[in-house]
Amino acid sequence: MRASNSQLSVISRYVARQFLALFVPILVSLVLLYFVVDLGDRLSGFLRDQASLGAVTRYLLFKIPLMVTQITPPAVMIAVLLAFGMLGRRNEIIALRASGVSLLQTAIPVLALAGAISIAALIWNETVVPYCSRGFRYVNTVEIRKRAVRGVLGERAIWYHGAGGFYNIDYVDRAQQAVYGLTIYRLDDDFQLLSVVRASHVRWRDGHWEVADAVEQQLEGGTFTTTTVPPESVLIPETLDDFLEVQREPEELTFMELRGLIQSLTGKGIDASHYLVDLHVKLAVPFSSMVLALIAVPIGGRLRRHPSIAAIIGLGATVGFGYWVLLGLSVSLGESGAISPLIAAWAANGTYALLGVVLFLWSD
């Protein structure tokens, strides 16, 4: 016996309400838990820096959008597991299948909602998260740690006012501990240009900078004279951490801004493979909600004998943890060049989507 369209419509609305009734409070609860844990983790730093209550509040409020982004996929998975686990406890899945409604038909409204959440997360990450990420980083640096604003950030370069002059930097590589595309504008006390030092890259080694190919253009009598600078004579008082502090992280950039930065770095001969992985991850991670829902439905639908809520949440945490471990591993391989950035970003989604399809076929 097959269910009619009207019956399927009623069932879809019922299942969708079950999911949404769980998803919203779970998302809010997990964000609050994340909020409390993050506050506790940083409390000693706030006290050490004697941060004001207003600065701490602004820092945490600016960080909430990033928390929502990170918490949404596990919240979707737990909500799906609970929704279908409760349907199983009440024997409603058995009744639906006896009425000719397959597990896939039962899951369609939930999968559609998970897809809508994924699209909303993608838009959220491109609009709200970059602005707020820049906001909480500024509050942390200037208002809490009380450091002066020494860097002016563009989409494709960094300007930094340091003790050695004004620095123009293309890219700061944390993994390689190097600065690429470095130009130093040295000024006198009256802010008159004295010379310009250029180096394709400098590396931070054992507490000092190693410079291999620096040249200096000195202004004398209105004209520039160019000389090769011995490595030991290039004075850069700042450390690598000083430059890293003013470089924008991928979450502070939109997809188009990050793509523009990659094109700019590549055009200058700088390896931007690290950013290329981040670019693809920006598209892949929002759809983790749909992928985790796809795998949670058949798992939740097979739960029997009155499983406890704790057991369902524990199962969801285990499966979700496996996804993030796989994503972290593939991203690391992509950043090292072992696999392509596209595969690195989408490997976890592809693996879990395939596993979800297999579980659906097994359930039927």
Image (spheres, helix red, strand yellow):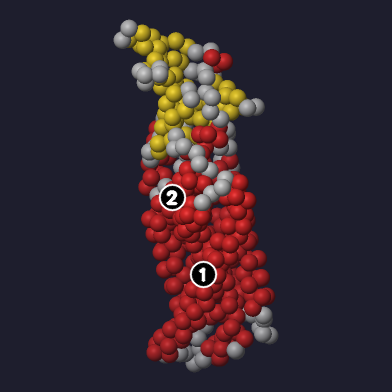
Instruction: Name the foreground residue: 162 vs 228.
Output: 162
Tag 2: amino acid? Gly
Q: Quadrant of residue 161?
A: top left
State the mark number for residue 135: 2
Q: In the figure, 338 relative to 216: above or below?
A: below
In the rendered image, is residue 284 in sight?
no
Tell me where residue 132 appears, x and y as whole percent. Answer: 43, 53
Name which of mark 1 and mark 2 comes first in the sequence. Answer: 1
- Element type at mark 1: helix
Q: In the figure, 361 relative to 91: above or below?
A: above
Question: Dot 2, crowdedness within 10 Å: few (<14), some or many (≥20)?
Answer: some
The quadrant of the image that shows the C terminus is: bottom right
Q: In the figure, 99 relative to 25: above or below?
A: below
State the mark number for residue 60: none
Q: Quadrant of residue 316?
A: bottom right
Q: Residue at x 44, y 62 (%)?
A: 121
**Drawn side of residue 271 relative to residue 257, left or right:** right
**Are dots 1 and 2 in contact, CB under 8 Å?**
no
Tag 1: amino acid? Val
Q: Which residue is mark 1?
A: 28
- Element type at mark 2: helix
Q: Residue at x 47, y 28 (%)?
A: 162
Q: Residue at x 51, y 51 (%)?
A: 52
Q: Residue at x 61, y 60 (%)?
A: 37
Disc number lying in front (1 or 2)? 2
Instruction: Name the foreground residue: 230 vs 237.
Output: 237
